[in-house]
Amino acid sequence: MSSILSRNQKVVPQKKTRQEYAEDALYREVWEDVNNEKTLKFIKKYYRYLIAGALVVLIIATGFQIGARHIAAQKMHTAEMYEDALASVDANNLAHFADDASGATADLALFQAYLLDGDVSKLERLVTDGDTRDFRDLARLHIVNVRGDEMSATDVEKYLSDLDTKSSPFYYTASLTIAQKYLADGNRESANKWLDKILNDKDAPASIVGTATPLR
């Protein structure tokens, strides 16, 4: 009976003695010293690599900041030059700006220069050297509008062949232009081929369809 009662009694944990507390403190102190010593040995062994790694991270971060600032400054300078050339309303200034600039900005400046002076050679330059497909294709269409009377329908079709893909923003306009040229040359069969191509395309713009329908 006494053994059962003793098992049911609450077990009260024994308090640590001062000596046990002192031993715990000494153990922690020794453990910290060991860890500190290991850390110092690790740093002494690999400090060159740690410093080199930190320098690499610093150089990369600095490089990104300098590069971003340089790009931003270049874009700002280009925008200012473009505004100056545009404000002058001078085709030559815009053409010179296009020589120094790049991308769509240069193409736009060169196309605007053509609009100012009507110099078709600027369109030809866009066709051969333009940085963006949109302006290259637009230049081809304008050249056909300017020189279409000097070209046969087959010449026009060949010249606009690069636009015969939906990746060109002027795909439908080019198709309609070719059809109209064949009609002007009296070739109804070839014209209908291009008109049918437009009218059977569910994605064709309403304005293009509206022009093509009475021609068919």
Image (spheres, helix red, strand yellow):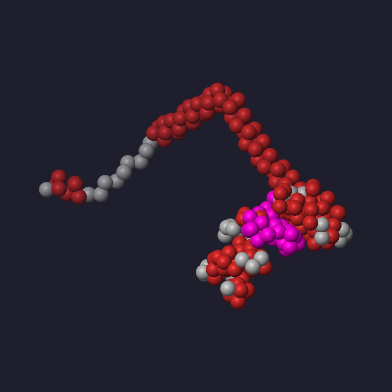
Among the 4 quarters of the image, the one containing residue 89: bottom right
Q: Look at 61% across and 74% down and name the residue there.
A: 215
Residue 116 lies, in percent from the top left, at 83, 61
Say whether residue 70 is visible.
Answer: yes
Among the 4 quarters of the image, the one containing residue 146: bottom right
Say whether residue 76 is visible.
Answer: no
Residue 141 belongs to magenta span: yes
In depth, the one of 20 and 152 nearer the eye is: 152
Residue 158 lies, in percent from the top left, at 63, 55
In depth, the one of 195 and 82 nearer the eye is: 195
- 79 left or right, relative to 134: right
Q: Which residues are magenta?
A: 131-158
Q: Look at 20% across and 50% down and name the residue there.
A: 8
- 202 left or right, relative to 95: left
Which quadrant is home to the C terminus?
A: bottom right
Residue 25 belongs to magenta span: no
Work out whether 34 lies above or below 154. Answer: above
Residue 99 lies, in percent from the top left, at 79, 48
Residue 179 lies, in percent from the top left, at 62, 66
